[in-house]
């Protein structure tokens, strides 16, 4: 059965592999079965634009891989989808000819130069090095204890949203956010998507009571309050206590 391995950002010189990775976005499928797998009539979709339909004769040999380019260049030869991957997060799924979903993955913001792939003993979705055509290698991650709340906006101008920004102080390793939680005095929201902060990088999460990657299920009270970042076991990583906020003015570490 084909298994999707979305790659959510272009590679960079900092991300090495056993061969030169393709330029731009791509998705790699693997056939874990003992016989060739025909993909004729199968579809690959991001549920936003027209799905990609695998043409007749598309086969993945046993224990082999197939790369699909997500670059919108459908006029070129080869396998090219009409959609590109959103590095801020989305859901990718693959369906068989009877439109039964065979596999899917939801991811949040990605770290440039790295991939999202199945790896490890449990074959979980992990941050990996880009290795098209070969088995996946998990990337080294920074400790979540180092993540810091860097900036927040609790009283936005009309039409804008509250937000919280997190910072990864590790200069060489990305950090994973899945399983962490942000909580106020009255609300609790766990980050479920496969999301990462790049080395020395930032991520902004919208506190808009929205759903999906990049959104938090609560708003920040403008009159003052507190919120904290928790690890997967509920232990506190960082906390902010703030007073009444001026409209359109953020607060943060400087």
Image: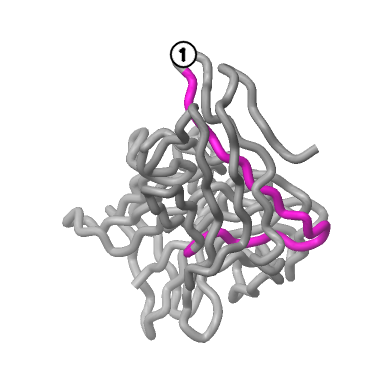
Residue 84 position, x and y percent, is 51, 39
168 inside magenta stretch = yes
Disc 1 secondary structure class: loop
Residue 75 vs 58, above or below: the answer is above
Residue at point 63% right, 21% down?
249
Residue 139 position, x and y percent, is 68, 69
Residue 130 vs 112, above or below: the answer is below
The way the protein has been coloured in the rendering is one colour
Q: Which residue is mark 1?
A: 158
Closest to the observer, 17 or 137: 137
User: How many numbered dots are placed on residues in this image?
Assistant: 1
Tell me the chief SS of the magenta region.
loop
Residue at point 38% right, 68% down?
2
Q: Which residues are magenta?
A: 160-179
Position of the C terminus, as image quadrant, is top right
Q: Residues within 10 Å of mark 1 (few under 14, many from 20)?
A: few
Residue at point 57% right, 50% down?
8
Residue 198 position, x and y percent, is 70, 52
Q: Kindly indicate the quadrant of the structure image that contains residue 142.
A: bottom right
Residue at point 48% right, 26% down?
161
Residue 181 position, x and y percent, is 48, 57
Position of the N terminus, as image quadrant, is bottom left
Q: Residue furthest top?
A: 158
Residue 121 vs 2, above or below: the answer is below
251 inside magenta stretch = no
């Amino acid at each position: 059965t084909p298994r999707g391995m979305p790659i959510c950002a272009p590679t960079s010189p900092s991300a090495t592999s056993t061969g030169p990775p393709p330029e731009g976005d791509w998705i790699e499928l693997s056939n874990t079965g003992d016989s060739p797998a025909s993909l004729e009539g199968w579809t690959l979709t991001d549920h936003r634009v027209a799905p990609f339909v695998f043409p007749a004769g598309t086969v993945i040999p046993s224990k082999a891989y197939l790369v699909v380019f997500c670059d919108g260049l459908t006029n070129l030869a080869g396998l090219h989808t009409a959609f590109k991957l959103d590095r801020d997060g989305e859901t990718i799924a693959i369906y068989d000819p009877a439109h039964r979903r065979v596999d899917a993955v939801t991811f949040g913001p990605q770290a440039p130069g790295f991939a999202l792939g199945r790896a490890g003993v449990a074959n979980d979705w992990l941050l990996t090095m880009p290795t098209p055509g070969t088995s996946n290698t998990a990337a080294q991650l920074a400790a979540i204890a180092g993540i810091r709340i860097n900036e927040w906006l609790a009283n936005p101008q009309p039409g804008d949203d509250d937000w919280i920004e997190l910072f990864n102080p590790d200069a060489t390793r990305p950090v994973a956010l899945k399983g962490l939680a942000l909580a106020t005095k009255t609300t609790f929201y766990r980050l479920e998507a496969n999301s990462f902060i790049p080395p020395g990088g930032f991520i902004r999460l919208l506190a808009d009571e929205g759903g999906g990657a990049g959104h938090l299920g609560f708003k920040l009270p403008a009159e003052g309050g507190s919120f904290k970042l928790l690890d997967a076991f509920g232990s506190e990583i960082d906390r902010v206590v703030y007073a009444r906020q001026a409209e359109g003015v953020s607060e943060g570490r400087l």
